[in-house]
């Protein structure tokens, strides 16, 4: 039961990271509903992604692969913790 809850929370957070990455591709102004939604996802996801950005520099100075690594680590950790419970 607790393992399933942890898996669901991990999946929800993974979805938040994917949505945040999509918002980073869309040019938004500083105000408006979409900008507020993007800011919400930035506040939720950036602390976790920032951990990986400190360790992994962008490839070629422009391509940021940290969301991919962060999602992989998140899924591995969530699956490991869920199996322990």
Image (cartoon, helix red, strand yellow):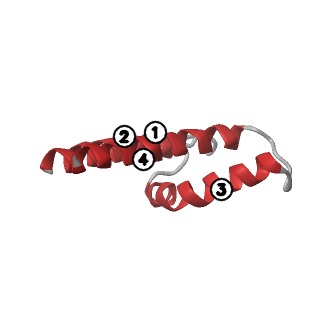
- Residue wearing tag 1: 68
- Residue wearing tag 2: 72
Q: Residue at x 55, y 46 (%)?
A: 58
Check if mark 4's residue and mark 2's residue have beta carbons within 8 Å: yes
Q: CA distance from mark 4 to mark 1?
A: 5 Å
Q: CA distance from mark 4 to mark 2?
A: 5 Å
Q: Position of residue 6 (x, y in %)?
A: 30, 49
Check if mark 4's residue and mark 1's residue have beta carbons within 8 Å: yes
Return the mark for residue 58. none
Query: Helix, strand, or loop for circle 3?
Result: helix
- Residue wearing tag 3: 40
Which of labels 2 and 3 is toward the front?
A: 3
- Residue wearing tag 4: 70
- Residue 65 seen in the current view: no
Check if mark 1's residue and mark 3's residue have beta carbons within 8 Å: no
Check if mark 1's residue and mark 2's residue have beta carbons within 8 Å: yes
Quadrant position of residue 40: bottom right
Callout 4: 10 Å neighbours few (<14), some, many (20+)? some
Q: Residue at x 62, y 52 (%)?
A: 41
Which of labels 1 and 3 is toward the front?
A: 3
């Amino acid at each position: 039961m607790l393992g399933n809850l942890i898996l669901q929370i991990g999946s929800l957070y993974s979805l938040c990271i994917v949505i945040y990455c999509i918002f980073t591709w869309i040019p938004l102004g500083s105000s408006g509903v979409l900008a507020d939604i993007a800011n919400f996802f930035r506040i939720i996801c950036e602390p976790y992604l920032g951990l990986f950005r400190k360790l992994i520099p962008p490839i070629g100075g422009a391509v940021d692969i940290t969301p991919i690594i962060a999602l992989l680590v998140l899924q591995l950790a969530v699956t490991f913790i869920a199996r322990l419970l």
